[in-house]
Image: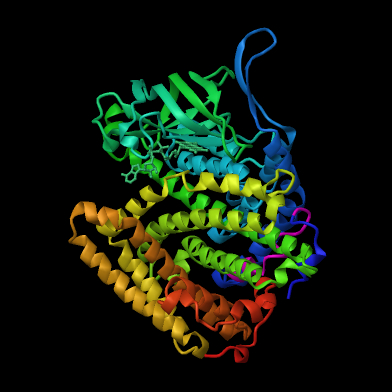
Amino acid sequence: MLADYAEHDQAIGLDWYALDPNLSFLLDRHLPEADDRKFAEEHVSEYGELVGQVLAARAEITDANGPVLQRYDQWGYDVGEVVHNPNWTANKADLVRTGFVGLSHHAGRSVPAVVTAARAYLLSQCETAAYCALGMTGGAADIVERHAPLSIRDVFVSRLNSLDPDEAWEGGMFLTERQGGSDVGANTTRAVADGGEWLLFGDKHFCSNVDADVFIVLARPEGAPEGTRGLATFIVPSRQPDGSPNGFTIKRLKPKLGTVGVPTGEVGLDGARAWLAGGDPKTADPGAARDGRGINRMMEMVNSSRFGVALMGLGIHRRSFLDAAIYAARRTQWGQRIDRYPLVRETLVDLLVDLEAGMAITFECAGALRGAVDQDEARLVRRILIPLAKMRSTRVALWAASSALEIFGGNGYMHDWPIARQLRDAQCHTIWEGTENILAIDVRRAIRGEQAHLALGSRIDRALDAATGQRVLASSVDVIAQTRREAWAAIDVLAAAPEDLALLQSRRLAELLADTAEAALLVEEAAWSLDHQGDARKAVVARRFVMRKLADLPLRGLLDDDRTVLDQFEPLVRYGKIEPGALVA
Ligand SMILES: Cc1cc2nc3c(=O)[nH]c(=O)nc-3n(C[C@H](O)[C@H](O)[C@H](O)COP(=O)(O)OP(=O)(O)OC[C@H]3O[C@@H](n4cnc5c(N)ncnc54)[C@H](O)[C@@H]3O)c2cc1C
């Protein structure tokens, strides 16, 4: 069991990996090969101290000293340069050195996706802004590697993956325009063929990491049809080889509520030189840009960014829990630690229960192949689970940050404590990479277009099978199985419903699928923990989640005599072992 939280002053300064046994638990589960697990231990555990002890303190300073756009230099020349606080730059430099982006490129072996996810989850606990910048860099590197013409590919890939902060490039992505937000098909930025290359003209309205080096940009090739199918994806450096701007002007930095460190700007493109992602450089055929598949390349980046934003939500959630657990252990009122009060206990336990549920589905996205029958099923599970995980974890993170702030009382509302920033940052993530509504509609698209719910249903059934036979999980398994049957039957009913009614229900449906998937993966984890570790803590977590989210308790559970949060508080929040015999079946 972890030490009493009262032994710590605050979260900053601690080893965040060592304090999070659920993260090592997930690595154990997802990485059954000893080699992979050893690799994970080495590369994830180093982030526990780096993030908790070094980066987190700097992130607080960055938040209070955000970037500014220096329009002109002292000679009056228009330089349009973003000036950062050195703490922001130092954090990114440390991350570059440890291969936050470049690990796969330099490790000399394949890097399991759960390792990358675990590092991102730890980083998000201190600074989702930094993860935004470097996550988009990884996404840009991936698009360049797979779709850039050979003339630029190797140099760009090696700079984007560099482990040397002086050499390393960063990336960004420009989709959104003033009139084209969720509806990117309304975009008007034009691409004009120029030999084998392209020139881009237009305005982009939300451009995060705006002073990066390479951008993945959506534009409409001249002659391409209107709407989404007419869009193509381009690779655009911010500077020409001689260092001069590449037809690229930062018009202003936006004044933001949170994620202060990463500059989000408005950009004008006036003849910016670009390469078509996925074009044929040998023929330089402009027709290739109008093949209707250009948007798909951008969507590859959007999907991986959506997964990243799900991890941001989890990071904020975990940090909120940790700060609140420490504060509640140290703060006394009426002569007693406030974490002795039943209502505070319930808040802390439910913060953790919902966090473990969110981690179960989000890490499943990274490790989908392990639990799937084949590659195709894994692809479909990821297809539907990524928007569900992003929608779920970012929304719950707002509740987590708000609940944690309230545990701090009035102090929580003040800038001299770290929790208010988590709440401000959390609000960004429900919007980035698609709002909740857009994700719910995307889940519906995955169901209607690709039947992805069938793959998810099979995965849920296998999770329930794994838990069947565990006495302490029996009632939870029954509730989940019933919800699974009813939810999937509802999908069939909604398929035949009028379009407006089906759209009206799409968010409710996505919520139900997320709850069911979380509950099923939690009981699977619980069964594994009972089998391999003789530990019923996860079973308690799973049962609590099922009772709150899926069970139909009379009178909202008011007369329920479940004492879990009172009697199991210490092993739950301090990750102690619970003997299976201590649980009533
Ligand atoms: C801090 C920050 C940084 C950003 N950085 C970038 C970036 O680097 N690159 C980039 O390209 N973009 C970026 N964005 C933009 C972001 O992706 C968009 O804000 C987001 O996609 C929503 O688009 P919008 O703001 O135009 O809202 P709108 O599309 O106008 O939506 C407004 C509201 O209407 C709802 N809505 C819209 N259509 C529907 C529908 N069909 N059904 C139901 N509801 C609907 C939405 O859910 C939302 O609640 C950033 C945004 C923020 C806040």
Q: Position of residue 186 (x, y in %)?
A: 31, 32
Q: Residue at x 72, y 51 (%)?
A: 411
Residue 355 or residue 229, whichever sits in front: 355
Is residue 521 something that shows in the picture? no
Q: Quadrant of the N terminus?
A: bottom right
- Is 538 placed left or right of 407 in the picture? left
- Bounds of the magenta span? 12-26
Indicate the quadrant of ligand 1 in the picture.
top left
Q: Main secondary structure of the magenta part?
A: loop
Extreme residue in the top direction: 75
Q: Position of residue 84 (x, y in %)?
A: 68, 30
**Above/below status of 72 relative to 54:** above
- Is 578 placed left or right of 232 in the picture? right
Residue 119 or residue 35, whichever sits in front: 119
Residue 108 or residue 85, whichever sits in front: 85
Q: Position of residue 336 (x, y in %)?
A: 78, 70
Residue 12 or residue 167, whichever sits in front: 12
